[in-house]
Image (cartoon, rainbow, N blue to C red):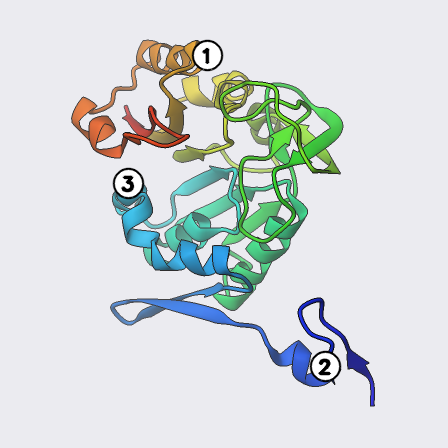
Amino acid sequence: MITVETKSTEDPIDLEEYEKIQPAMVIPVGNIKVVYATPNAMTGWRVKTFFTKEPETVAWMGEFGSGEVMVDVGANVGMYSVWAAKTRGVRVFAFEPESQNYALLNRNIIYNQLSSQVTAFCTALSDDTGFDVLHLADFNYGRSCHSFGSTLNFKLEEQKFAFTQGAFATTLDLMVQSGTIPAPHHIKIDVDGFEHKVIEGAKQSIAGPTLKSLLIEINQNLPEHMGIVDYLKSQGFDYSQEQVNEAERADGIFEGVANYVFRR
């Protein structure tokens, strides 16, 4: 009998039984069941806090119309990509360069039978195209605060990262211009500090007539991020200060960070 030894115990377990352990959690929505793989505590926490962690994001997705196109930049394990596709009937293009998250993102797509509706790219979106290194805050499912091409953290300050992997980045505009993806109706951007670079590489898509809304994580302590707010207002987008105030982190390391919902 083939066995496998885990790092947490010296007792060998049956390999076939081990492979069957694929824990998942379900969020029921009426007669719909949204399934998420939960191989560790972090991914389980993401499911348990789905409605409380970012209620503004859930409310924003509730505005989507069936058949519209959403681009999810920094999709992580696909919590919002899967939700938007399964509950709103939208077409989603999800971008996640970190290997562990990308694998689980695809598993969540499969679990929800969304292969024809959600396409995941193991790619970062930025202001330029090319290969570089992705610096990892942690090597595990569901983790965030990684950094592409730079050892800067979400505050744009130098940080020492424990792990790295190879990665590729391109721009949203190039993806649309090449016909790889259609012009989006909605864009979500959460890349832990480099949101301004994603915007720089998406200016043609933003200026186009298709885009209706964006949800962006803004660190209000950074002039680069506040420049995003000014730029989007110049493009005819607006936001609710009340919504921002409700979403703003009041303390902790993310103090001053808030999701802004822009609509045109």
Q: CA distance from mark 2 to mark 3?
A: 48 Å
- First reached walking from the N terminus: tag 1 or tag 2: 2
State the residue position of label 2: 11
59 over 155 or under it: above or below: below
Q: CA distance from mark 3 to mark 1?
A: 24 Å
The label number, if any, that marks residue 60 in the structure image: 3
Q: Is residue 13 left or right of residue 255?
A: right
Q: Is residue 92 left or right of residue 216?
A: right
The label number, if any, that marks residue 224 in the structure image: 1
Mark 1 is on which residue type? Glu
* 235, 223: nearer the viewer: 223
Mark 2 is on which residue type? Asp
117 over 8 or under it: above or below: above
Q: Residue furthest bottom?
A: 1
Mark 3 is on which residue type? Trp
* Secondary structure at numbered mark 1: helix
